[in-house]
């Protein structure tokens, strides 16, 4: 180093600018070397510090094993058991409305009244015609009685006598016809001019106001006055595929007796006792509810599978004493699709997503995190049922997932059982997704 410096000094008098440039370049190289050495020493110190750091701690637990039943979920709508359109049999002016829009009505409650005066007049006319027919019958009867005496002494011919018999028969027929006309007029006045509710249910809004002319009859141009739908019980309609239909039929024929579906002490239904439409218990939740708290029974399955969609229509019936369910409302129904069987369950929070696949992180015997793909099923008792991909001996990471990645070593802390989320009732859900 010193020789190079002296050499530069000896040449300074000859090439002063060139020597100064070499000195500056040499100083720059010295500074760069010093910085590199400092960085290397710092990196080595940090590596030694990381090597001595503690392993991340995670909480692991083995899956819970218990008996569960597989469920399928479907979206459907509520429909009324009975739905009636209120239309008048008679034409006339509407004289009164006897309900409030949206009111719950009972069978026989008065709803509408058609102006009764025209029908009262018709009834009086029919009664007068009946009285006239009876008078004619009385005269024909007395004339026949006289003719029978005259026929005995040959005062009248048999032809005249037969005419009197015929006149009496015609008079009797006229009385019967007029009597029927009176009965019809009484029905119009007493029954059809007052429109009463044919069912128990909830009535909609009125479609006409008092004073409007109502068109009645049995044709297609009659006036719609209001509609009534029954609310308790209520039905729920949904559709499911052919494969599910076969599973439900087999499950229904082999399901065990339950307090909800069978009387106490009764054996399980026999194989020929019926299919899924013979009272398989189901549960339901509304769109703003988390749990399947409403219970009912399947009471009908259609007799054909749609050739266009490959689905079949099912129907369940639910009690609705509070009127919460309304026809047309959406809901989600849960249908049992298997007999009770042993299954593995883990907390739903332990399941991760990788595009369309679900996975869990487990810790092996050496403390290394491994990734396992699983097939989640429904929620049971606050835990997610795992249909496939998990072993009873797997140690699933249930806490500390943010510190765990596949392939790294962790410090596992055992937990006796996966923590069950706090829930007042058993929730239910479809396949995780």
Image (cartoon, rainbow, N blue to C red):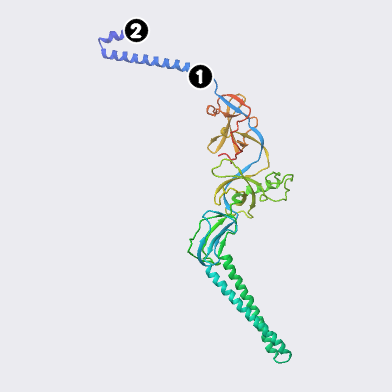
Q: Position of residue 371 (x, y in %)?
A: 57, 31
Residue beneath disc 2: 2
Residue situated in front as seen by the camera: 8 or 245: 245
Q: SS for tag 2?
A: helix
Taking the image as shown, residue 97 lies to the left or right of residue 13, namely: right
Taking the image as shown, residue 216 lies to the left or right of residue 136, namely: left
Residue situated in front as seen by the camera: 168 or 318: 168
Residue beneath disc 1: 50
Q: Position of residue 99 (x, y in %)?
A: 53, 57
Q: SS for tag 1?
A: helix
Residue positioned 57% across, 65% down in the render: 192
What is the CA distance from the residue labelled 1 to the residue labelled 2? Answer: 43 Å
Depth-wise, is mark 1 or mark 2 nearer the camera?
Answer: 1
Quadrant housing residue 408: top right
Q: Position of residue 262 (x, y in %)?
A: 70, 46
For disc 2, the neighbor class at 10 Å (few under 14, some 14 to 19, many from 20) is few
Q: Please tell me how many numbered marks the rendered image carries.
A: 2
Residue situated in front as seen by the camera: 220 or 41: 220
**Compared to 9, does 316 lie above or below?**
below
Image quadrant containing the C terminus: top right
């Amino acid at each position: 180093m010193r020789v190079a410096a002296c050499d530069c000094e000896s040449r300074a008098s000859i090439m002063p600018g060139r020597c100064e440039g070499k000195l500056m370049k040499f100083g720059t190289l010295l500074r760069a070397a010093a910085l590199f050495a400092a960085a290397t020493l710092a990196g080595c110190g940090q590596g030694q510090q990381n090597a001595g750091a503690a392993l991340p701690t995670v909480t692991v637990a083995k899956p819970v094993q218990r008996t569960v039943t597989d469920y399928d979920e479907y979206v459907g709508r509520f429909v009324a058991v009975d739905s009636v359109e209120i239309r008048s049999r008679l034409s006339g002016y509407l004289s009164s409305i006897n309900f409030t829009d949206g009111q719950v009505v009972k069978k026989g409650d008065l709803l509408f009244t058609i102006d009764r005066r025209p029908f009262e007049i018709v009834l009086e006319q029919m009664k007068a015609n009946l009285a006239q027919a009876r008078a004619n019958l009385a005269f024909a009867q007395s004339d026949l009685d006289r003719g029978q005496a005259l026929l005995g002494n040959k005062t009248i011919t048999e032809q005249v006598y037969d005419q009197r018999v015929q006149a009496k028969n015609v008079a009797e027929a006229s009385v019967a016809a007029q009597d029927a006309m009176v009965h019809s007029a009484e029905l119009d006045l007493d029954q059809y001019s007052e429109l009463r509710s044919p069912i128990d249910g909830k009535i909609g809004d009125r479609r006409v106001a008092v004073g409007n002319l109502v068109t009645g009859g049995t044709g297609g141009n009659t006036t719609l006055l209001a509609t009534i739908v029954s609310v308790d019980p209520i039905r729920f309609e949904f559709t499911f595929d052919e494969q599910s239909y076969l599973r439900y039929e087999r499950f229904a024929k082999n399901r065990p007796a339950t307090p909800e579906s069978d009387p106490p002490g009764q054996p399980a239904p026999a194989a020929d006792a019926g299919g899924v439409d013979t009272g398989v218990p189901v549960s339901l939740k509304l769109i703003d509810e988390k749990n399947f708290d409403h219970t009912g029974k399947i009471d009908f399955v259609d007799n054909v599978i749609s050739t266009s969609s490959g689905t079949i229509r099912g129907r369940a019936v639910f009690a609705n004493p509070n009127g919460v369910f309304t026809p047309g409302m959406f809901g989600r129904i849960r249908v049992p699709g298997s007999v009770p069987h042993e299954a593995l369950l883990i907390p739903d929070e332990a399941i991760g997503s990788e595009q369309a696949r679900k996975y869990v992180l487990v810790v092996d015997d050496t403390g290394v995190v491994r990734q396992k793909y699983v097939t989640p099923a429904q929620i049971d008792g606050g835990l997610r049922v795992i249909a496939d991909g998990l072993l009873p001996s797997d140690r699933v990471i249930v806490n500390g997932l943010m510190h765990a990645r596949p392939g790294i070593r962790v410090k596992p802390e055992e937990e006796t059982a996966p923590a069950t989320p706090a829930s007042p009732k058993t929730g239910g859900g479809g396949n995780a997704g």
